[in-house]
Amino acid sequence: MAKSSAATQERLQRAHETALSALRGQSSEAVAVPLNRLIHERIRLGIVSALAVNRSLTFNELKAMLKTTDGNLSVHARKLEEADYIVCTKSFAGRLPKTEYRLTAGGRRALERYLDHMEALIRATRDR
């Protein structure tokens, strides 16, 4: 567990230094590190975040949580599926169709990288 914590701290420090350099305009490489646009979109970030703290969620649960429409949720969920960030399981509960989503290990890693990046940008901005 200590290794994991040390690795996380090291990753956060590198992200922090990269973000700080980018804000100061000192590194052309740092400026080239964009946010993960796939996760950064509001609905997709909501889907991935909700699934990160729940084992799985149904389509209707996600729709209610995110206060979005069927079509909007479907489109964003499909993009996350195509990136292998989430998996979708379709079944029936009696005669009613049930669509359930789960976050993949790759999706969890992508969310962690995204959060590290955002935390580094926030720290760099506060340090200015």
Image (cartoon, rainbow, N blue to C red):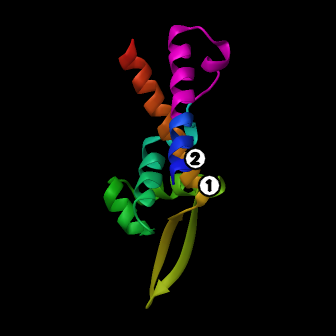
Q: State the residue position of label 2.
A: 110
- Amino acid type, mark 2: Ala
> Which span of residues is magenta-colored?
12-34
Residue appearing at x 45%, y 57% in the figure: 52
Instruction: Name the quadrant of the C terminus.
Output: top left
Is residue 33 visible to us here? yes
Q: Which amino acid does label 1 sit on?
A: Gly
Q: Is residue 93 above or below residue 60?
A: below
Vertical arrangement, residue 101 with respect to residue 76, above or below: below
Crowdedness near tag 2: few (<14), some (14–19) or many (≥20) residues, C-alpha within 10 Å: some
Name the foreground residue: 91 vs 111: 111
Q: Does the magenta stretch include residue 28?
A: yes
Q: Which residue lies furthest to the front in this view?
A: 2
* Residue 36, position as x, y percentages in the image: 57, 37
Q: Residue at x 41, y 50 (%)?
A: 46
Please identify the quarter of the rendering in which residue 15 is found: top right
Residue at label 1?
A: 106
Q: Are marks 2 and 1 in contact (CB under 8 Å)?
A: yes
**Helix, strand or loop status at disc 2:** helix
**Residue 9 on image: x %, y %:** 50, 37
Q: Is residue 12 left or right of residue 127?
A: right
Q: Indicate left or right for 75 with 27 as reference.
A: left
Please give the label number shown on residue 61: none
Q: Residues within 10 Å of mark 1 (few under 14, many from 20)?
A: few
- Gap in Å between the C-alphas at discs 2 and 1? 6 Å
Residue 96 coordinates in the image, percent (x, y): 43, 84
The residue lying toward the viewer, choosing from 31 and 27, is 27
- Whether residue 40 can be seen here: no
